[in-house]
Image (cartoon, helix red, strand yellow):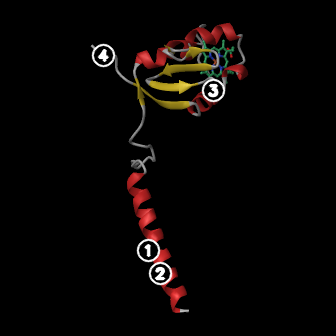
């Protein structure tokens, strides 16, 4: 019985230590819940993802990996694909014809965010 008690106590403190260590390791978050250790991509890194099945776009300063969404996009592929690997804010905001995407498209876009675009080096 005593052995069980010792074992249970040891296990308890082991768990406390594990949670403490995990808390230190996990990236900190601000009040909005956004991870502070966010990834930031240089334009050159963005440019390396310019293929239909590896397509990143920068829109309003954020970088999105939209590869999984492209086959679902309602336009002809030729409309969106040229923007893979590029800064595409204007294309996204005008659909190349002066009309903005819907709020629903904005919500969809948010799901594919992977980080922010780093400023160009001088
Ligand atoms: C940046 C390049 C892009 C261009 C040039 C572009 C262009 C277009 C065009 C021409 C249409 C169909 C016609 C129309 O609704 O007027 C369309 C519809 C749509 N696109 Fe895009 N698109 C782009 C990127 C994206 C991305 C990255 C997403 C989401 C992840 C997206 C989501 C949608 C949705 C949901 C629709 C249906 C209509 C709406 O909700 O506005 N598009 N887009």
Q: Nearer the viewer, mark 2 or mark 3?
A: 2
Residue 8 or residue 90, whichever sits in front? 8
The reply, left or right, for residue 74 in relation to residue 109 is: right
Quarter of the view holding residue 91 = top right
| Residue 9 - label | 2
User: Badge 3 local density, few (<14 within 10 Å), some, or many (20+)?
Assistant: few
Q: Do the residues labelled 4 and 2 touch (CB within 8 Å)?
A: no
Q: Is residue 40 above or below residue 56?
A: below
Confirm or reject: label 4 Cβ below 8 Å from ligand 1.
Answer: no
**Which badge, 1 or 3, comes first in the chain's sequence?**
1
User: Badge 2 local density, few (<14 within 10 Å), some, or many (20+)?
Assistant: few
Q: Helix or strand or loop: what does disc 3 sit on?
A: helix
For label 3, the residue is 105
User: Badge 1 local density, few (<14 within 10 Å), some, or many (20+)?
Assistant: few
Confirm or reject: label 3 Cβ below 8 Å from ligand 1.
Answer: yes
For label 1, the residue is 13
For label 4, the residue is 121
Q: Distance between the residues labelled 1 and 3?
A: 48 Å
User: Badge 4 local density, few (<14 within 10 Å), some, or many (20+)?
Assistant: few
Quarter of the view holding residue 38 = top left
Image coordinates of residue 63 in percent, x first then y, are 49, 25
Q: How far apart are marks 1 and 2 (CA)?
A: 6 Å
**Which badge, 1 or 4, comes first in the chain's sequence?**
1
Q: Helix or strand or loop: what does disc 1 sit on?
A: helix
Quadrant into which the N terminus falls: bottom right
Image coordinates of residue 73 in percent, x first then y, are 69, 20
**Which badge, 4 or 3, comes first in the chain's sequence?**
3
């Amino acid at each position: 019985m005593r052995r069980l008690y010792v074992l249970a106590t040891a296990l308890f403190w082991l768990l406390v230590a594990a949670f403490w260590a995990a808390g230190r390791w996990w990236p900190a978050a601000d009040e909005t819940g956004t991870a502070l250790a966010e990834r930031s991509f240089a334009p050159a890194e963005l440019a390396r993802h310019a293929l239909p099945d590896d397509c990143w776009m920068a829109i309003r300063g954020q970088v999105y990996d939209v590869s999984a969404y492209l086959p679902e996009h309602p336009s002809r592929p030729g409309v969106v694909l040229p923007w893979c690997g590029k800064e595409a804010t204007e294309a996204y905001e005008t659909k190349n014809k002066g009309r903005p995407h819907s709020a629903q498209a904005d919500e969809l876009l948010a799901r594919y965010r992977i980080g922010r675009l780093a400023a160009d080096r001088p």
